């Protein structure tokens, strides 16, 4: 029990600041200090500038060859793609609105691994865990963004009868995709960024989370939380319970053990990424539903992620 309390306290320490900044955004909106214009402008700024900078810096400064694990990366890719397709197929059976469908799919699969996952991995395994988690982050950042763009774009475009080529063109010119394309060769060939570029990039990247969380808080209202409670509940249950259980058990069956298995479990068990809100709002999906999912998964992860770490400790993975 002491081990569980320790895991609970550590997870709460990571998650609580996120919740407080969201609450601050909600409070500032209620006080009239920020308004809809701020939410729209900050969301656009994050989507077109600061989030691409974060993606670029995360990948470009990654030592690609040092921690390359093809087996682990392959499982994460295959597991994510299968679960993504299954979530989409099941959600399409009962969600009629294209805007709601895209928001639900993204909220159900996309993890906040860069904020929570790295911190938890470092706490459990030190520098080796951080290095392994960083490589997974370099993989999931482009993968999550591509999959998010697809699920946010295709339902809306199909409802508007826009051609497949125009949709693919929109995906290809997305700022996040361009950031990935530019950063991957730099990471692969070990090119060192000039100090001025690296420092400027970090400044922009560091703006991403606070701006996104304030915008989420500025969008929240209790009525919408009640109205979307069914979809938010199932997205939260999928993100925090079903996916971690199924994908972690699958990784164990395949043969992963110890640190490799635990780092993947953390990836699957993290709450929905705050960047999901910015993408949903900018691309025309249901940003309010996305904000609700981020809030409920972030709060719920204090219990579920702590329990996952506790079970991993009991099983000797940690």
Image (spheres, helix red, strand yellow):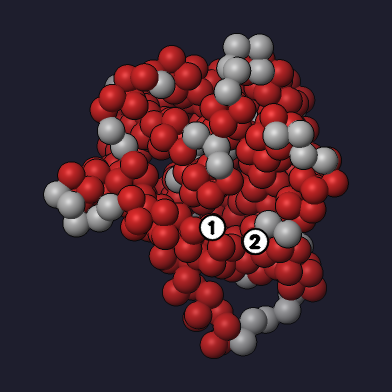
Asked whether the beta carbons under mark 1 and mark 2 sit within 8 Å of each other, the answer is: yes
Q: Where is residue 129 in the image (x, y as percent from the top left)?
A: 55, 50
Q: Note whether 176 is above or below 247 in the view shown.
A: below
Q: Note whether 296 is above or below 114 in the view shown.
A: above
- Closer to us: 153 or 112: 153
Q: Position of residue 24 (x, y in %)?
A: 22, 49
Mark 1 lies on residue: 47
- Closer to us: 296 or 1: 296
The residue most toward the left is 31
Q: Can residue 183 be seen in this view?
A: yes
Residue 25, labelled with which disc? Answer: none
Mark 2 lies on residue: 175
Disc 2 is placed on an element classified as helix
Disc 1 and disc 2: Cα gap in Å? Answer: 7 Å
The residue most toward the front is 161
Name the residue rendered at 41%, 65% in the picture. Answer: 207
Disc 1 is placed on an element classified as helix
Name the residue rendered at 34%, 26% in the picture. Answer: 224
Q: Quadrant of the N terminus?
A: top left
Name the residue rendered at 34%, 57% in the picture. Answer: 38
* Image side of residue 208 versus residue 109, left or right: left
Q: Note whether 216 is above or below 310 in the view shown.
A: below
- Closer to us: 246 or 66: 246
């Amino acid at each position: 029990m002491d081990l569980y309390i320790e895991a609970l306290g550590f997870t709460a320490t990571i998650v609580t600041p996120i919740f407080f900044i969201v609450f601050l955004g909600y409070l500032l909106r209620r006080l009239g200090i920020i308004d809809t214009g701020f939410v729209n402008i900050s969301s656009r700024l994050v989507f077109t500038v600061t989030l691409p900078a974060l993606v670029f810096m995360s990948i470009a400064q990654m030592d690609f060859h040092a921690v390359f694990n093809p087996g682990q990366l392959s499982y994460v890719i295959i597991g994510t793609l299968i679960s993504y397709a299954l979530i989409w197929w099941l959600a399409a059976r009962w969600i009629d609105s294209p805007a709601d469908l895209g928001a639900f799919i993204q909220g159900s699969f996309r993890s906040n691994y860069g904020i929570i996952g790295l911190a938890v991995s470092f706490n459990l395994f030190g520098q080796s865990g951080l290095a392994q988690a960083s490589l997974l982050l370099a993989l999931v950042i482009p993968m999550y963004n591509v999959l998010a763009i697809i699920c946010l774009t295709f339902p809306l475009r199909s409802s508007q009868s826009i051609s497949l080529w125009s949709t693919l063109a929109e995906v290809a010119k997305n700022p996040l995709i361009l950031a990935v394309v530019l950063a991957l060769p730099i990471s692969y060939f070990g090119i060192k960024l000039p100090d001025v570029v690296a420092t400027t990039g970090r400044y922009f990247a560091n703006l991403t989370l606070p701006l996104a969380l304030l915008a989420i808080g500025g969008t929240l209202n209790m009525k919408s939380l009640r109205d979307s409670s069914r979809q938010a509940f199932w997205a939260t249950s999928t993100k925090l319970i079903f996916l971690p259980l199924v994908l972690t058990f699958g990784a164990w069956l395949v043969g992963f053990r110890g640190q490799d298995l635990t780092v993947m479990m953390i990836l699957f068990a993290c709450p929905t990424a705050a960047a999901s809100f910015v993408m949903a709002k900018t691309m025309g999906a249901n940003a309010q539903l996305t904000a609700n999912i981020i809030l409920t998964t972030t709060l719920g992860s204090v219990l579920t992620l702590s329990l996952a770490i506790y079970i991993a400790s009991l099983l000797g993975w940690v």
